[in-house]
Image: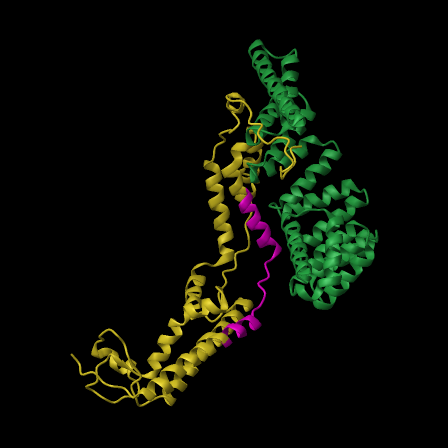
Amino acid sequence: LNVLIIVFTEMRDKLRKWREDNHRNSEQIVDVGEELINEHASKLGDDIWIIYEQVMIAALDCSRDDLAWTCLQELKRQFPGSQRVKRLAGMRLEALEKYEDASKQYDSILQDDPTNTAARKRKISILKAQGKSAEAIRELNEYLEQFVGDQEAWHELSELYINEHDYGKAAFCLEELMMTNPHNHLYCEQYAEVKYTQGGLENLELSRKYFAQALKLNNRNMRALFGLYMSASHIAASPKVNATVKKANVKYATWATNQINRAYQVSYARCLL
Amino acid sequence: MAPELLLDSNIRLWVVLPIVFITFLVGVIRHYVSILLQSDKKLTLEQVSDSQVLIRSRILRENGKYIPKQSFLMRKFYFNNQEDGFLKNTKRKVVPPSPMTDPSMLTDMMKGNVTNVLPMILIGGWINWTFSGFVTTKVPFPLTLRFKPMLQQGIELLSLDASWVSSASWYFLNVFGLRSMYSLILGQDNGADQSRIMQEQMSGAAMAMPADTNKAFKAEWEALELTDHQWALEGVEEELMSRELDLDGMFSKELPTGIF
């Protein structure tokens, strides 16, 4: 009996950790969560509601509509008229590709509470799922006009723009993210990549600088290291630069090459171990 | 030295302790009633949007040095431009929230009064009437004679030291003293905390929210005008290449976030 209890607490703590870290390992969540709900529901107390929500979203990811439906019913019973539950119902309709009904569901949430950001964002993801990227971009822009601070939305918009090859606007979105998260090396790196793709001497210089910044923030970012090498050699090879700039960039590229060699040696050494 | 009075121990049993209990229970009841009567503060879309715009402008000022100069100037122009800059030209309708015109504030004030002031008066009066005619306790510090009519409500002794107080004043002492007990039992933000509520009422009058938006915009505009762009990435390559990369733990499995 003690072993069962220990297993139960472990499962519950794992779910909590995944919830707090925002992991999307849906299959694992469904496995652990389903067992937790079926076997140990009574021991969970009030935690059970948030676990229902977590498991339901994971179930939708894994196409387990049966499990999602059960969770939804329990939540509806406990919290009738809750907007959070309505949003989950809308997500289920989305997973079943009933986009019209899902859209209506979100509209009803927005009627009650125009400031509800979750419903607005779900509507935009419906557009994205239907492949209507132009409309999705337009809606997302409108959303961001109201809620300038929503970082998730800025990131999503930058992705949409990259897919549409509108690199200038994608760079703008990434700049917003870099300002709000100055120590996140991944945003610097993505920005540098966008600038590199845009091309042109000025953009290449910018991209080299931001690759360097990403490396400064995280010495182990291999992609940024390669990016630094590529942008520096590109500039050095360009016919339009003068001798000093060329020399400087050759120096950067050489340094980057040395570091890349070192990294391969480290990995080789680890393989040998 | 005033002569020490010896109080009947019955007073302690039947007056001091019941008053403490009554005050405490009334406070707990007040807390739960305030939770029931709490109305949701609904923010309008405009307020949410404005607060986020202000945050964005502040972030631009603080972290603008991480983006290229051109981008920074572009955003500064958007906010501060003479003709159509957002901060310069957006005027919000300013309705000073006077309690008479704003209905939601009126009901809030009513509820505040009903839950807090009214019970205090009622119970204070009841205690005064029930436990009158005798001295309850002695405050440990000497008081002047001016306090006598206030603190010795039902006692008609001219020569009694003002430190000896009646039950009504013991009640008031309790109301303020049990605050820390409430925080212990009901958690920090509890509705039974009288003095905090009075403090809120006083500061709330000074902190009229909607009028602030225009002033906040103006303040941000001024601050942004003064901000200059000092690109943090000026010498980043040199800084980076001044030493070898720290590749420690690069390919270890325990790395929490991916390198790519």
Q: Which chain is yellow?
A: B
Which residue appears farthest toward the top when viewing the image?
Answer: A243
The secondary structure that dominates the magenta segment is: helix
Q: Position of residue B207 (x, y in %)?
A: 45, 58
Stretch of the chain drawn in magenta = B29-56
Q: Quadrant of the C terminus of chain B?
A: top right
Residue in front for this viewpoint, A177 or B58:
A177
At x 57% / y 72%, what residue is drawn?
A: B36
Residue in front for this viewpoint, A6 or B195:
A6
Q: Position of residue A195 (x, y in %)?
A: 65, 27
A43 inside magenta stretch: no
Which of the 4 image quarters holds residue A252?
top right
Residue B57 in sight here: yes
Residue B129, compared with residue B183, is above or below; it is below
The number of discs equals 0
Q: Position of residue A220 (x, y in %)?
A: 60, 29
Which of the 4 image quarters holds residue B179?
bottom left
Q: Position of residue B222 (x, y in %)?
A: 46, 41
Q: Which chain is green?
A: A
Residue A107 in sight here: no
Which residue appears farthest toward the left when viewing the image?
Answer: B1
Q: Quadrant of the N terminus of chain B?
A: bottom left
Residue B108, compared with residue B123, is above or below; it is above
Residue A1, compared with residue B83, is above or below; it is below
Q: Is residue B170 left or right of residue B109?
A: left
